[in-house]
Image: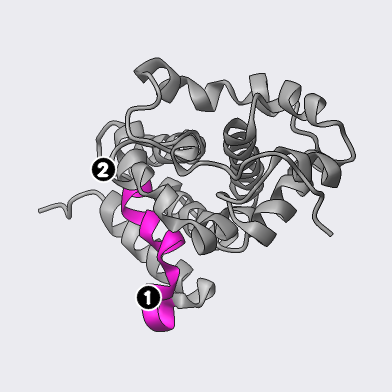
C-alpha cells in the first residue's frame, strides 16, 4: 500500500522544461553521474522504479519513495536533492548500466558492425526497462524537451558509449571519415523514436524486429561511400 504523504504530486515543470539547465549543466550531466548517482543505491532505484511504474511521474511523492526504500524522507532528499533529481539520476544510472552491459555484449567483424549491433541492443534493452517505459507510458509529454530542445544526461551516456565504437570503425576503415561524436549524436537523435514511439512501428513494435532494422539503418549511415 502506498505510504500516506503530505507531499504534493510532482509538478510537470519539475521534470523537464526547455532551458531549465545551463549549457554547463547539460554537458556535465553524463560526466557528473557519480556526484548524485553514486548515492542512488539499488534499493533506492528499485523504490523509484516501483513508484513511477505504479503512479507515473506526476503523482510520485518523496514520502512514498522513502517508505519503499526503507529510509527517512530527509535522507531521501539528502541523497537526491528532490524528486526531480532523484528520477533523472535514477534514469541516468539505469542508462549507464544498460549502456555498459550492451557494449560488453555487442559484436561485429568491424567497427561499423559493432556500432550498429550496439545501437540495436541499446534500443531493445531500453524498451525493456520498466522505469523508463513507465515514464513513456504515464507521462510521455515529459520527454518532449529531450526530443525537440536538448539532449538529456541519459542520452549523453549513450553518446559516450557509441562514440568509441564509431572511432573504432573510422580507424579500421569500415566507417566513413567524420567526427565520431557528431555521428553518435545523429544516431541517438534518429533512433530515439524507436524507443519512445515503439508502438507506432506496427510489426516492428516487436523489439527483436526493430533491432534488425536499426542495425541496417545505422550501418547504412556509417558505411563509407562506394569506391569508384
Magenta stretch?
A: 187-204
- SS class of the residue under badge 2? loop
Decide: few, some or many residues near mark 1? Use Cα within 10 Å; few <14, some 14-19, many ≥20. few
Which secondary structure dominates the residues rendered in magenta? helix
Please tell me which residue is depicted at 49% across the width and 39% down the height of the picture. Answer: 15
- Does 102 sit left or right of 17 as displayed? right
- Depth order, front residue of 25/47: 47
Q: Please tell me whether residue 200 belongs to the stretch shown in magenta.
A: yes
Residue 87 point in image, percent of width and height = 61, 40
Crowdedness of circle 2 by 10 Å Cα count: few (<14), some, many (20+)? some
- Say the numbered circle drawn on residue 176: 2
Residue 16 in sight: yes
Q: Which mark is in front, 2 or 1?
A: 1
Find residue 122 and report its horizontal and vertical position in percent.
Answer: 53, 54
The residue at which mark 1 appears reads as: 201
Query: Relative to 83, is 3 above or below?
Result: below
Earlier residue among tags 2 and 1: 2
What is the residue that sits farthest to the top in this orientation? 24
> Is residue 174 visible to us here?
no
Residue with the most extreme bottom position: 203
Residue 75 appears left or right of 185:
right
Numbered tag placed on residue 53 in the rendering: none
Amino acid at each position: 500500500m502506498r505510504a500516506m504523504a503530505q507531499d504534493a504530486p510532482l509538478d510537470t515543470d519539475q521534470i523537464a522544461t526547455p532551458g531549465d539547465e545551463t549549457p554547463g549543466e547539460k554537458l556535465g550531466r553524463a560526466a557528473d553521474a557519480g556526484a548524485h548517482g553514486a548515492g542512488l543505491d539499488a534499493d533506492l532505484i528499485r523504490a523509484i522504479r516501483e513508484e513511477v511504474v505504479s503512479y507515473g511521474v506526476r503523482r510520485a511523492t518523496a514520502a512514498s519513495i522513502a517508505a519503499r526504500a526503507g529510509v527517512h524522507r530527509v535522507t531521501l532528499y539528502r541523497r537526491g536533492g528532490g524528486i526531480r533529481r532523484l528520477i533523472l539520476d535514477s534514469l541516468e544510472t539505469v542508462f549507464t548500466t544498460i549502456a555498459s552491459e550492451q557494449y560488453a555484449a555487442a559484436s561485429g567483424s568491424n567497427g561499423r558492425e559493432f556500432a550498429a549491433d550496439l545501437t540495436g541492443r541499446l534500443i531493445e534493452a531500453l524498451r525493456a526497462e520498466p522505469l523508463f517505459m513507465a515514464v513513456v507510458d504515464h507521462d510521455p509529454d515529459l520527454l518532449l524537451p529531450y526530443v525537440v530542445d536538448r539532449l538529456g544526461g541519459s542520452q549523453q551516456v549513450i553518446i559516450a558509449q557509441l562514440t568509441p565504437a564509431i572511432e573504432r570503425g573510422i580507424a579500421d576503415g569500415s566507417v566513413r571519415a567524420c567526427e565520431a561524436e557528431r555521428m553518435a549524436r545523429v544516431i541517438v537523435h534518429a533512433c530515439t523514436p524507436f524507443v519512445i514511439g515503439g508502438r507506432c512501428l506496427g510489426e516492428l513494435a516487436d523489439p527483436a524486429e526493430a533491432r534488425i532494422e536499426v542495425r541496417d539503418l545505422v550501418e547504412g549511415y556509417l558505411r563509407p561511400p562506394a569506391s569508384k
